[in-house]
Amino acid sequence: MSFKIDSYSFFETKLVRITNTSTLEHIDISTKGGFLNSWTLSQETGHFDIIDGNNLQDHWKHYESNGFKGAKMNPFCCRLQNGKYNHNNNAYSIDKFYLGAHALHGIIYDAPFEITQTERKEDSASVTLYYEYQQFDKGFPFKYSIEIKWTFTNENKIIVHTKIKNLENQSIPMMDGWHPYFKLADTIDESTIQFFDNGMLIYDKQLLPTGQLSHQQTFENPTKLAGIILDNGFLLDMNKPSCKLENNKYLLMVTPDGQYPYLQLYTPENRKSIAIENMSAAPNCFNNKMGLQILQPQSVWLLTTTYQLFYK
């Protein structure tokens, strides 16, 4: 086999490491949160890690304040206005994390996923994680399950499949997204970004969508990130869904399936990385309904996104 799978304990979590034994490239998946925390390139690169991940040895003390790196955003993404929404003529108010007046990034970003399966093949290896939400937040009193399958292939590609099942006998509101931070060098300023969109979401001063779109299509050509500050959402052109991050050494392609038509980009102040966030819906979707999925009783929703790195 060209791949091996190991696991390491870090306080409240385990790291599952999938290694391509031919190239020594490897990825680390955190069972707490179920996210990608590291993607380390081959020895020729000096084992450069293109993920701006988390220090898991600090007992998660700074996870939220450090930007929710890698987070599984579910059942809502980004900001939920005042943490409140209505569903089936009932009003709900989220208890989980708030930034200012608004609930942020869902309620399961620190959930304790369990490993249910690992699989090794000649050209890939995968780990499957499972979490069953048990109504711990009174603002989302609906049972559902999430299964995440991370696959690492010999094409230096990561494929992440998400399976969400409504365990209730009533419909529930749902959104899904990812919040990884990527870096191709010590700063993003020398990198370019390119993608095709059908409009940029216009946000108000609280970063909530107004419902309007701007059609400037600024990033149809490779655009250098130096001097550009982003905390913006876009409606992708799903005929050309890939977002490309590139510098003189690497090309990263982030390619969602049709279930993730929204793209959020965020550049932190330190300019070390950029968050490229595939999302099924817009921020505040529980209220503005932009991309909101209503899962019917016992129904299943499947979503996939892919990250692939090319050496130049």
Image (cartoon, grey):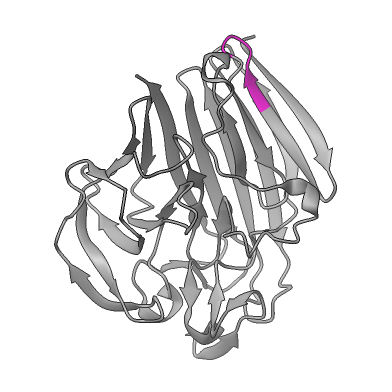
Q: Nearer the viewer, residue 14 or 225?
A: 225
Asked whether 19 falls inside the magenta stretch, the response is: yes
Picture coordinates of residue 216 (x, y %)?
Answer: 14, 61
Position of 187 compared to 263: left or right? right
Position of 180 compared to 240: left or right? right
Q: Nearer the viewer, residue 213 or 175?
A: 213
Can you say whether 83 is above or below 255 in the image? below
Q: Quadrant of the C terminus?
A: top left
Q: Nearer the viewer, residue 213 or 218?
A: 218
Q: Look at the image and give the residue range highlighted in magenta.
A: 18-23
Q: Which residue lies at the image location 61% right of the left edge and 45% below the top edge? A: 53
Picture coordinates of residue 45 (x, y %)?
Answer: 52, 19
Q: Which residue lies at the image location 33% right of the left edge and 63% below the top edge? A: 233
Can you say whether 254 is above or below 69 in the image? above
Question: Which image quadrant for residue 170?
Answer: bottom right
Asked whether 99 falls inside the magenta stretch, the response is: no
Position of 24 compared to 269: left or right? right
